Image (cartoon, rainbow, N blue to C red):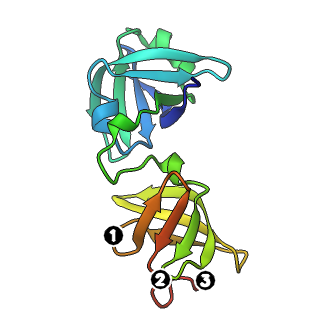
């Protein structure tokens, strides 16, 4: 069985002398991902380096300070600046009606009358607001659909389809 990895964040800098790093976090599950001894992987391209969380401090909304059990000094960790942090995709990490962003990408988007509108090209998480970035079929443009119960009526990960409620002006560019 092939392992699927999810991007958790990117190591953007070292922090201090004891092997801590600054991470730009892209995971909405950081309480789980950054819990003590949780296993992550540093993406080295052709291989993944297994690491486990020693400590976590939140610096800003998307910036976190992490240390790993495997490293104790800046000299051991500085070569990983610019590398992605990954986690193994495990649907047991989700609650009911939660989705991995990667599962929503490339889903076809339909209105409530089953008219195909376009395709999700990206899921964006902006300051507690999640949007589906949708490339419209009828126009060479993209729109943003708020990912909430008002607009998103049904998500079917298995068939990669999403049904949305369209209000006046939503599809206008």
Q: Is residue 74 visible?
A: yes
Q: Residue 87, how many percent across, how many down?
A: 45, 29
Q: Residue 155, how many percent across, how many down?
A: 45, 61
Packing grade of label 2 (10 A; few <14, some 14-19, many >=20) is: some
- In the displayed image of the protein, which residue is found farthest to the right? 140
At horizontal 48% and vertical 79% (from top left) the residue drawn is: 112
Whether residues under marks 3 and 1 lie with C-beta atoms below 8 angstroms apart, the answer is no
Work out whether residue 119 or residue 141 is closer to the camera in this orientation and state it.
119
Give how far apart the Cα atoms at labels 2 and 3 are.
Answer: 14 Å
Packing grade of label 1 (10 A; few <14, some 14-19, many >=20) is: few
In-image side of 113 versus 130 (left or right): right
Kindly state the secondary structure of the residue where label 3 is placed. loop
Write down the residue under mark 2: 166
Closer to the chain start, of discs 3 and 1, is: 1
In the picture, the quarter occupied by the C terminus is: bottom right
Write down the residue under mark 3: 173
Kindly state the secondary structure of the residue where label 1 is placed. loop
Give how far apart the Cα atoms at labels 3 and 1 are.
Answer: 23 Å
Which disc is residue 149 wearing? 1
At horizontal 34% and vertical 35% (from top left) the residue drawn is: 92
The quadrant where residue 57 appears: top left
Work out whether residue 1 or residue 166 is closer to the camera in this orientation and state it.
1
Give how far apart the Cα atoms at labels 1 and 2 are.
Answer: 12 Å
Name the front one of labels 2 and 3.
Answer: 2
Closer to the chain start, of discs 1 and 2, is: 1
Numbered circles on residues, count: 3
Q: Residue 103, how many percent across, how many down?
A: 52, 48
Q: Residue 12, how many percent across, how many down?
A: 50, 33
């Amino acid at each position: 069985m092939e392992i699927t990895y999810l991007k958790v964040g990117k190591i953007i800098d070292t922090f201090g002398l004891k092997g801590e790093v600054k991470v730009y976090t892209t995971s909405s599950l950081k309480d789980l991902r950054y819990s003590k001894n949780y296993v992550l992987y540093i993406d080295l391209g052709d291989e993944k380096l297994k690491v486990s969380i020693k400590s976590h401090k939140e610096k800003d909304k998307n910036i976190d300070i992490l240390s790993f059990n495997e490293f104790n000094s800046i000299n051991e960790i500085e070569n990983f600046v610019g590398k992605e942090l990954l986690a193994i995709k495990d649907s047991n990490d989700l609650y009911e009606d939660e989705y991995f962003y990667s599962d929503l990408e490339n889903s076809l988007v339909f209105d409530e009358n089953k008219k195909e509108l376009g395709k999700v090209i990206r899921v964006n998480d902006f300051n507690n607001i999640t949007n589906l970035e949708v490339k419209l079929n009828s126009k060479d443009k993209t729109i943003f659909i708020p990912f909430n119960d008002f607009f998103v009526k049904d998500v079917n990960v298995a068939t990669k389809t999403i049904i949305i409620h369209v209000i006046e002006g939503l599809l206008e560019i």
